[in-house]
Image (spheres, rainbow, N blue to C red):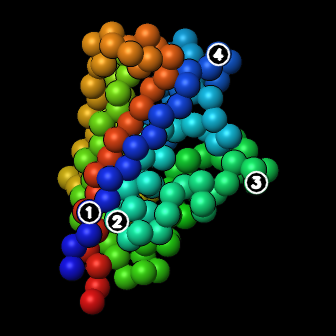
Amino acid sequence: MNRVGLGFDIHPTAPDRPLILGGVTVSAERGLAGHSDADVLSHAVAEAMLGALTLGDLGRHFPDSDPRYRGISSLRLLAEVLALVTARGARLVNLDATVIAQAPRLGPWLPEMAKRLAETLRVDLDRVSVKAKSPEGLGLLGREEGIAAMAVVSLEVEG
């Protein structure tokens, strides 16, 4: 049986923080605020995987009230989500994700983001698509007040 999950995450920009997307540190004037490393791409992927199996959201599994998760790599959280998914007899078929950001332009970093996600999810690179989209100056994302990401996953579940 196949299951599909949709994930979304958004974080406000913040000074004095690195910008980490898909586990890659991107050269930028501002990073993202959050309890963990605020990697919206990894968060969206994890949310999609949890959603495909109706396992709730990241906040349920890794609450921001828990000091263990302060500053944690979101790829570590994604690896833990993968363990939950695998324990339920599911495997990732494919991932399609989009980061929505006015700046910086993300094209040069997209291949490395896909590679890091594929490694973390233990799948071949040809199963992982990472794209970027500009909000064309519209809304809070267009004003560079935040960055968002969306992800869709397909999981194959035994039984």
Q: Work out how far the residue at label 4 is from the one at label 1, CA to CA, in angstroms.
A: 36 Å
Q: Hey, which quadrant is residue 34 in on the image? A: top right
From the image, tell me which residue sits under label 1.
Answer: 4
Could you say whether the residue bearing mark 4 is in a helix, strand or loop?
loop
Q: Tell me the kind of residue under disc 4.
A: Pro
Residue 78 x/y as whole percent: 50, 56
Residue 82 x/y as whole percent: 46, 66
Q: Hey, which quadrant is residue 71 in on the image? A: top right
Is tag 3's residue or tag 4's residue first in the polypeptide sequence?
A: 4
Residue displayed at 45% across by 55% down: 46
The answer to whether 14 appears left or right of 122 in the picture is: right
Q: Tell me the kind of residue under disc 1.
A: Val
Residue displayed at 28% across by 52% down: 152
Q: Tell me the kind of residue under disc 2.
A: Ala
Question: Which mark, residue 64?
Answer: none
Could you say whether the residue bearing mark 1 is in a helix, strand or loop?
strand
